[in-house]
Amino acid sequence: MTAGPAEPGIPLGAAQRVAWLRLIRSENVGPATFRDLLNHFGSAAAALDALPRLAQRGGRPIRIASAADAEREIEALDRLGGRFVGIGEPDYPPWLREADGAPPLVALRGGTAGLTRRPAVAIVGARNASVAGRKIAMSLARGLGMQGFLIVSGLARGIDAAAHEASLSTGTVAVAAGGLDRLYPPENLDLAERILAEGGAHLSEMPLDWEPRARDFPRRNRIVSGMAAAVVVVEAADRSGSLITARLAAEQGRLVCAVPGSPLDPRAAGTNRLIKNGAHLVTEAADIAELVAPQFGRPLAPPPDWREEGEDALERADEPAADDRARLIEALGPAPIGIDDLIRFTGLSASTVQILLLELDLAGRIARHPGQRVSLIER
C-alpha cells in the first residue's frame, strides 16, 4: 500500500534551511504566516529582510531569530541524531503536507528510510486508560502495523503508550509537544528510546530545549491527526484532549473512528458521543483498514505555494495606503472571517489584503483560524 503519488519539491540547501528555521523561529511567525511570507517575497531570506518594516507598519517591532541561533539549533539537533525536514522534502510526512497549518519545518529523529512516507493511522485516547482500553489499543496498533500501516501517537500515558508499544516492530512515530530533547512524560522516556532502537521516529515542530506547556499539546495534536488518514480514539472522557484531536482530524478531512465503551464508564463518554455524532464505530484493525483503504488511491496535493521561487518571483512590499489599512481593520472583528470574504467586503486587491494581514499578524494583532480565516485580537 502506498500513500499516493506525493510530489515533494526541491530539497533545501544549507543556507535555505538556516533561513527557513530563522523565519519560523521569529516572533509571531506561525505556519500560515510563514507560507504567506514565502509566497509574497519568493524566499525565506527575502522575507527576513522585509520583517522589520512589515512589523513596524503593523504597530510594533518583533524579535527576529538570528542566523547564529538557527545554526546552533541545527548543530544541536544533529548531535542528538536528528535533522530538520522541510515541507517540500521527501521525508516530510505526505499527509501532513496537505493539512491546514502544517509546520514548514519539523525536527525528525530516527526513522528508517521512507518511514514517514508510509500510510499512517493515529491512535489516541485516555491517559488514565483501563486495562481493557490498553489491550484494545494494542490489538488495533498491532493489527494495523502488520498490514503495513505506520502508527502515530503522542507518547502520552495510557492509550498513546499502548499504541506505540504494540507497533514497535512494525513502525511508529511519537509526536512531541516540546523539543525533541524535552520529551514528556518522563516515565515514557524508556519507551521513547525503544521506539528509536526499533527503527521508529520522534517528530516535533518545537525548538530544542522547549519544555511543553498546556497550550502546546493541542498544537501537537494537529500534527498527530494531520499525519494520518484516520484518527482512532480509544477511551476518552467528555473533556479529553483526545476529543480535540478528533475535532482537528475532522477539520483536516481525516476519518474519525472511535471504539465504543460502557455507558457506566466515564472514560467512554467521549468516544460514545463521537459515535453518536457520526464517527465510525470500530472494534478491530480490519474495520479501520477497510475504511481507510480508499483514501490511499487518491493523489495527495503537491504544495507549490511552499516552494522558493527565486529572485524573479519577488513582489514589492510597497506600503499600503493608510485608508486601506483602516478599511481592513474596520472589517475585522473578534469573530473569524474568511480572507476571500475580506477581499470582497473591503474591495481591496488580494495582494493588498495579504500584505496588510501580514503586517497585523507580525504585530500580534490578528489570530489565524482553520479554513483561511482570521480574527482581530482586541487590544
Image: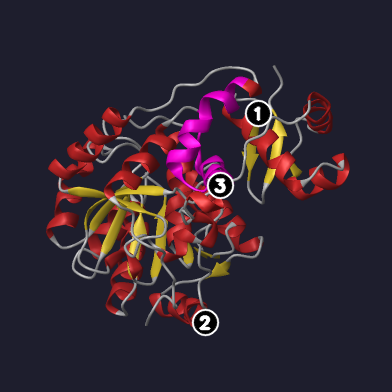
* Label 3, residues with CA under 10 Å away: few <14, some 14-19, many ≥20: some
Residue 51 in picture, x, y percent from top left:
52, 29
Name the residue carrying label 1: 360
Q: CA distance from mark 3 to mark 1?
A: 21 Å
**Vertical relation: 104 (above or below) 336:** below
Residue 12: numbered disc: none
Left or right, 345 with respect to 111, comes to right
Please state which of the two labelled residues, at mark 2 or mark 3, is closer to the viewer. Answer: 3
Foreground pick, 238 / 91 = 91
Please name the amino acid that badge 3 sits on: Leu
Residue shown at 50% from the left, 44% from the top? 31
Q: Rounded to the nearest whole Å, what is the CA distance between mark 2 and mark 3?
A: 40 Å
Determine the image quadrant of residue 246: bottom right
Q: Residue furthest front?
A: 312
The magenta segment:
28-56
Q: Secondary structure at mark 1?
A: helix
Q: Quadrant of the C terminus?
A: top right
Which label belongs to residue 294?
2
Q: Main secondary structure of the magenta part?
A: helix
Which comes before the other along the chain, label 3 or label 1?
Answer: 3
Q: Amino acid at mark 2?
A: Pro
- Badges 2 and 1: C-beta atoms under 8 Å apart? no
Residue 184's x, y, as percent? 28, 38
Q: Is residue 371 visible?
A: yes
* Disc 2 crowd, CA 10 A, few/some/many (<14, 14-19, 20+): few
Above or below 339: residue 360: above
Residue at mark 3: 314
Which comes before the other along the chain, label 2 or label 3? 2
